[in-house]
């Protein structure tokens, strides 16, 4: 009997410890959720306190830059076209494109410097437009103007190279009897070589100053060919790249977009309607904030799932412990029953022996009589 009571007491203690562990885990989970929400709210508050005045400063700087550019363009008065005025810049591009007389190197280099300054000016204007300005709609027009200027500039350099090669016989090198020509400024370097001698012993040519050269295969050494090399010292491809950086629209918040932290103290299974209502955020919130809230919700769900898995594992271990204690108690009770039955059998055997001894004693007495 004492062993049976001891086993029952152990089982009760194990059950009590299991309930206390479950309660402690639930409290820890709730406290951690509260701390995380409070920390997130504090960090978001500090972030918006830091970023909002700086957004205003950026807007003011852009407005100031735009006004300074307009005043500088008005006071310039040097005959160059204003790249932000579409009729003016289109007229300049059309006249330059149709010009056939002035295609010499000096004039093309001069136009190159002017075009690059206009492109730089358009890029500066595009980057200085404030986000709340109506002029944002003109940025695609500015990009298209830049492409037109670059294409016209490339075409004019090809025309210039053709014009130079038409005079190759007059500029023939006396040593090699071929044509070599170079021209450069701070933005462009052009190298031209033409095969006039058709000498098979000439294997190639090197423009040593510009680290540019080539080797000719034998069939080409007898052919009428010309090789033109353009070295551009400005960026021509980034603006046309699909991987170029896009302009990011920055939202200016006029209210506190940080949601209040909420911790559900009651453990209940949410219905489908509650799940759908919980997943839907206020459509009036900014997209960045809704995305942040969705990511926060996903992290909280992942943390809750991990806590639930840990709790289930702990419950499983406690259940196995309870089963072991119950099994031990049942085995002890069975042992007690076995011992009790054994003692009863021994008592019966002793009684039988006593009865036999008494009968034997009576028989001995009768024989003595």
Image (cartoon, rainbow, N blue to C red):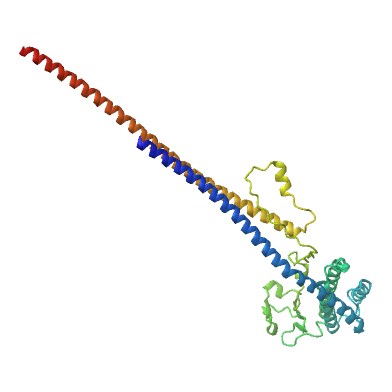
From this view, report whether residue 67 is shown above or below residue 365. below
- List x then y, in percent, for residue 46: 69, 67
Q: Residue at x 68, y 79 (%)?
A: 213
View extreme (left): residue: 368
* Picture quadrant where residue 145 is located: bottom right
Asked whether residue 336 appears in the rendered view, the answer is yes
Q: Is residue 294 left or right of residue 240?
A: left
From this view, report whether residue 25 is shown above or below residue 330. below
**Which of the image's four quarters has the C terminus?**
top left
Q: Is residue 354 left or right of residue 69?
A: left
The number of numbered badges drawn on the structure is: 0
- List x then y, in percent, for residue 68: 86, 80
* Picture quadrant where residue 126 is located: bottom right
Query: Which of the pair 114/331 is nearer the observer?
Result: 331
Query: Which of the pair 255/80 is nearer the observer?
Result: 255
From this view, report whether residue 338 is shown above or below residue 204. above
Q: Residue at x 12, y 15 (%)?
A: 362
View extreme (bottom): residue: 174
Query: Which of the pair 182/123 is nearer the observer?
Result: 123
Asked whether residue 158 appears in the rendered view, the answer is no
Query: Which of the pair 171/134 is nearer the observer?
Result: 134
- List x then y, in percent, for residue 209: 69, 85
Q: Is residue 47 left or right of residue 14?
A: right
From this view, report whether residue 254 is shown above or below residue 189. above
- List x then y, in percent, for residue 312: 53, 45
**Which of the image's four quarters has the N terminus?**
top left
Q: Residue at x 71, y 65 (%)?
A: 45
């Amino acid at each position: 009997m004492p062993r049976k009571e001891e086993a029952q007491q152990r089982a009760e203690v194990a059950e009590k410890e299991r309930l206390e562990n479950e309660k402690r885990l639930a409290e820890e989970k709730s406290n951690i959720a509260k701390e995380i929400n409070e920390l997130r709210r504090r960090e978001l508050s500090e972030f918006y306190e830091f970023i909002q005045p700086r957004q205003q400063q950026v807007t003011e700087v852009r407005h100031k830059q735009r006004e300074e550019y307009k005043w500088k363009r008005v006071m310039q008065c040097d005959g160059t076209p204003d790249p932000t005025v579409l009729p003016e810049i289109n007229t300049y591009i059309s006249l330059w494109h149709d010009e056939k007389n002035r295609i010499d190197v000096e004039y093309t280099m001069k136009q190159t410097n002017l075009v690059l300054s206009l492109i730089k000016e358009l890029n500066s204007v595009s980057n200085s437009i404030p986000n709340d300005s109506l002029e944002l709609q003109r940025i695609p027009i500015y990009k298209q103007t830049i492409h037109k200027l670059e294409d016209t500039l490339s075409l004019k350099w090809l025309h210039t190279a053709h014009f130079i090669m038409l005079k190759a016989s007059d500029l023939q090198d006396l040593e090699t009897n071929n044509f070599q020509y170079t021209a450069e400024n701070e933005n462009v370097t052009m190298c031209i070589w033409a095969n006039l001698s058709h000498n098979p012993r000439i294997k190639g040519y090197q423009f040593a100053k510009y680290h540019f050269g080539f080797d000719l295969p034998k069939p080409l050494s007898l052919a009428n060919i010309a090789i033109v090399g353009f070295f551009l010292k400005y960026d021509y491809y980034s603006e046309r790249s699909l991987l170029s950086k896009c302009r990011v629209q920055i939202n200016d918040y006029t209210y506190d977009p940080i949601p209040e932290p909420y911790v559900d103290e009651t453990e209940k299974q949410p219905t489908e309607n509650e799940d759908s209502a919980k997943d839907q955020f206020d459509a009036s919130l900014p997209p960045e904030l809704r995305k942040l809230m969705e990511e926060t919700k996903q992290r909280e769900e992942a943390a809750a799932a991990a806590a639930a898995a840990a709790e289930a594992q702990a419950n499983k271990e406690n259940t196995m412990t309870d089963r072991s204690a119950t099994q031990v108690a049942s085995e002890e009770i069975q042992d007690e029953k076995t011992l009790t039955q054994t003692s009863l059998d021994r008592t019966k055997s002793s009684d039988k022996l006593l009865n036999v001894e008494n009968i034997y004693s009576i028989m001995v007495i009768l024989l003595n009589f």
